[in-house]
Image (cartoon, rainbow, N blue to C red):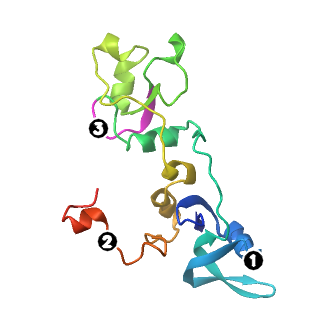
Amino acid sequence: MRTLVLNAGYEPLAIVSFKRALVLVMNDKATVIERVEEDPVWGTHGVYDRPAVIILARYVRVPSSRRVPVTRRGVLRRDNHRCGYCGKAASTIDHVLPRSRGGADSWENLVACCLRCNNVKSNRTPQEMRWQLRFTPRPPHGTAWTAGAPSAATRGGSPTWPSRRSPCCRGRTSRSRRLGRAPS
């Protein structure tokens, strides 16, 4: 089971094991916001609620310059599992400039790629193939990348985390809702 950790300002900070979350709660470093009712944790000294979402007692400053490490899973997630060349479902990654020609393992040189395009492209550049990339590869940004996406973690049988708003914003409607627009 995984637990979503929210910063004191209610922004997602990390996804941790329920054991780590329970330690934070027992040491008064966090408070349980959402629990898994039907699955308590049995200990030698009692029964504890299994945390699904916790909030830290103190605000933790996250450096904005924190770089996300390049991984196969990360590239596929960044590109929404779509091929950078044809747009079909992607299962592999491709070096835009092949490694044999000095291409680096960097966010700017890797794209998600379908098996067919990856095999056809082989050891060539998109320019040599007269192919056009659908987008310019860039490093990911935002708290979803530094904390991990809850949607990715829920596939492993974790609870679905409800959307959270800070207490000062509860009851308020968003500007787009007031103006009659669909949320973006």
Residue drawn at (47%, 25%), measured in percent from left and top? Answer: 109
Discs 1/3, front: 1
Query: Under tag 1, what secondary structure?
Result: helix
Residue behind mark 1: 26
For residue 172, what is the image quadrant?
A: bottom left
Badge 1 vs badge 2, beta-carbon distance below 8 Å: no
Query: From the viewer's perspective, is residue 21 above or below residue 184?
Result: below
- Residue under label 2: 173
Give the alpha-carbon distance from disc 1 to disc 2, as whole Å.
Answer: 35 Å
> Where does residue 167 sit, x and y in percent of width and height?
49, 76
Instruction: Looking at the image, tell me whether mark 1 or mark 3 is earlier in sequence order.
Output: 1
- Overall secondary structure of the magenta section: loop
Residue type at the position of mark 3: Lys
Number of dots carrying numbers = 3
State the separation of the CA atoms marked 1 and 3. Answer: 47 Å
Instruction: State the SS at label 3.
Output: loop
* Placement of 174 over or under 142, stated as above or below: below
Q: Is residue 131 above or below residue 35?
A: above
Q: As shown in the figure, which amino acid type bears the numbered disc 1?
A: Met
Location of the C terminus (image quadrant): bottom left
Mark 3 → mark 2, Cα distance in angstroms: 37 Å
Residue range (magenta): 86-94
User: Pointer 3: what residue?
Assistant: 88
Residue 78 horizontal side relative to residue 17, left or right = left
Query: Left of 27 or right of it: where is 181?
Result: left
Q: Which residue is at a point 22% across and 61% down the rendered structure image? A: 182
Mark nearest the camera among 3 and 2 is 2
Give the residue at x 55% y 65%. Answer: 9
Three-letter amino acid code of the residue under disc 2: Thr
- Residue 12 at x, y = what percent? 53, 60
